[in-house]
Amino acid sequence: MTPPRRQVDVDFLQAFNDAWNRHDIEALMSFMADDCAFHAVAGPELLGRSYVGRAAVREGFQLAWQTFADAAWRDGEHFVSGDRGVSESTFSGTRADGTRIEARMVDVFTFRDGKIAVKNAYRKDRPPVRQP
């Protein structure tokens, strides 16, 4: 039997945000469609770096925590309109070299069948700062 489809609404996006803050890859992937895509904030492509398919998206998501062990997405604000949605938050994280990033960011989502088909991430290009 197929589990019931979650309603894609503001609570759905807040739960997705909460899973990011718990660094819970299994919970995150439960929100994603089988043929999902993730376009990261940086990379050589027009859309940053694109991860396509569940295995690649999982790798891309985990890279955030590998790069920023203390990664957090705070002050989330979300909206959903039909098969599209947006989450705005403040991203913060410290790299292994001690530099810290804190900047506002936006995720633009495309939904299909109660799941996230595309997560397209954008972040302000604020220079990292060295922690004292």
Image (spheres, rainbow, N blue to C red):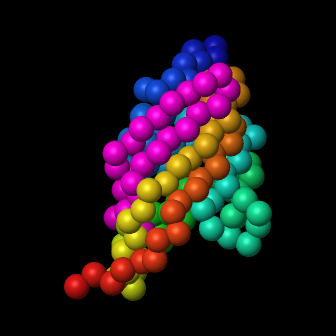
Is 34 situated above or below 25? above
Of 25 and 79, nearer the camera is 79
Residue at the image position 50 percent from the left and 41 percent from the top: 87
Residue 51 % position (x, y): 71, 57
- Left or right: residue 104 compared with residue 31: left
Is 89 situated above or below 16? below
Is 113 situated above or below 23? above
Residue 106 % position (x, y): 53, 49
Counting the numbered discs, the total is: 0
Of 25 and 97, nearer the camera is 97
Residue 66 % position (x, y): 47, 69
Q: Quadrant of the C terminus?
A: bottom left
Q: Look at the image and give the residue range highlighted in magenta.
A: 68-92
Would residue 8 be seen by someone viewing this image from the given angle?
yes
- The quadrant holding residue 39 is bottom right
Q: Is residue 130 magenta?
A: no
- Left or right: residue 97 compared with residue 83: left
